[in-house]
Image (cartoon, rainbow, N blue to C red):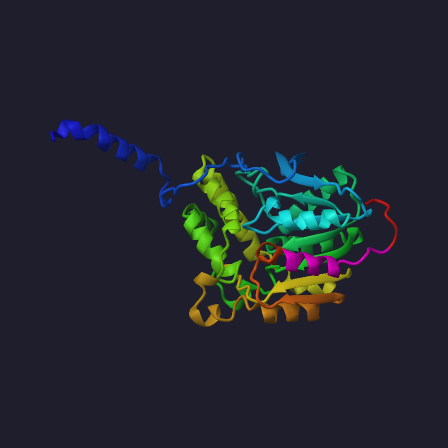
Amino acid sequence: MRCSALWPALSVIVAVALVRPVGAARPDDGPRYGRELQGFDYPWAVRHFRFRSQGMALDMAYMDVIAARPNGQTAVLLHGKNFCAATWKSTVNALSHAGYRVVAPDQIGFCKSTKPSHYQFSFQQLAANTRALLDSIGIGRAVFIGHSTGGMLAVRYALMYPESIDQLVLVDPIGLEDWKAKGVPWQSVDAWYQQELHSTAETIREYERATYYAGTWKPEYEVWVQMLAGMYRGPGREIVAWNSALLYDMIYTQPVIYELGRLTMPVLLMVGDKDTTAIGKNRAPPSIRATLGNYPVLGKAAAAQIPHAKLVEFPDLGHAPQIQAPDIFNKALLDGMRAPPGGDEGR
């Protein structure tokens, strides 16, 4: 073949190489979603709370599910770092059938909500955003249920607005240890960003299999893998990765473990004993790594520190019991949720 015949093919290869960000992984096959998860359907209608924060116009997506036979109570669900409001599907169904109004937001920086290019992320800011959302739809008090990073947020919210909490439920919350104090090395936001650019369905799936589902896998988990991977395949992958990097920095630098003793409301702590989640564990020296993410120990220590806590353990489940074993989890959740004190005013 003559060299001139090769030139068009070589031009395409060079062009593709130039548009791919430095250090980015090659995209894998699968759906491509927008920067705010456009193209991925949620199980209930998505509403939008538009507000201003830090000089920017932001849009906080949320689901507001009204029970067919309301019991006068509200449950607010706070998702984790690699989760979205939609991943609460089974829990929303169970709570709604039990009579709860259920509000499940996507926090700023996540999923269907705005991903700003510059934002000072803090758990206090996310809590204030959530409070503003609830005020806008007339919810004054609720049971707050936080999973994973949402557990850290729920703790911060409860410390800031204790009068608005009927009960606090923490589902495999991260932040039950201070990784920095234990020796996990700091990583810059730029380094987090480069790491996140390498996210693919394969890397997400393998992490979830090992950590969320205790080494097991079911076909129904795949939709949540593709939910995340689709944003990293899509046209907004850089801003998705950048927000993820900023959020990891927030998680690492803003521990809540030292303030658990200040929680004044009833707390239901639900822990999958096979959970091993610890931020930055892969960067820690082997001797330290082996001590991190020991949830049977962390759960008991946290329950002992919280004044009004009840601990529920799932011996065979991992980081996401609400997805891994929804029937078992939902029964334990409803059994552990008690009627809030006082009347229904403001709910």
Q: Residue furthest left?
A: 2
Q: Is residue 331 magenta?
A: yes
16 or 271: which is nearer to us? 271
* Left or right of residue 333, residue 277 in this image: left
On the image, the x and y values in percent for residue 118 come to 54, 40
On the image, the x and y values in percent for residue 326 come to 62, 55
Task: Tell me: residue 179, above or below residue 134.
Answer: below
Write the start and end of the magenta stretch as one range. 327-341
Residue at image point 69% right, 68% down: 303
Residue 263 seen in the figure: no
Task: Tell me: residue 268, above or below residue 128.
Answer: below
Task: Tell me: residue 302, above or below residue 77.
Answer: below
Q: Can you say which quadrant of the picture contains the C terminus? A: top right
* Left or right of residue 24, residue 184 in this image: right
- Magenta stretch: helix, strand or loop mostly: helix
On the image, the x and y values in percent for residue 174 come to 59, 59
Looking at the rendering, which quadrant does residue 282 occupy?
bottom left
Q: Can you say which quadrant of the picture contains the N terminus? A: top left
On the image, the x and y values in percent for residue 77 come to 67, 49
Tally the numbered discs. 0
* Left or right of residue 27, residue 340 in this image: right
Residue at image point 82% right, 48% down: 71
Looking at the rendering, which quadrant does residue 169 occupy?
bottom right
Residue 310 seen in the figure: yes
344 or 119: which is nearer to us? 344
* Left or right of residue 178, residue 51 in this image: right
Q: Is residue 244 magenta?
A: no
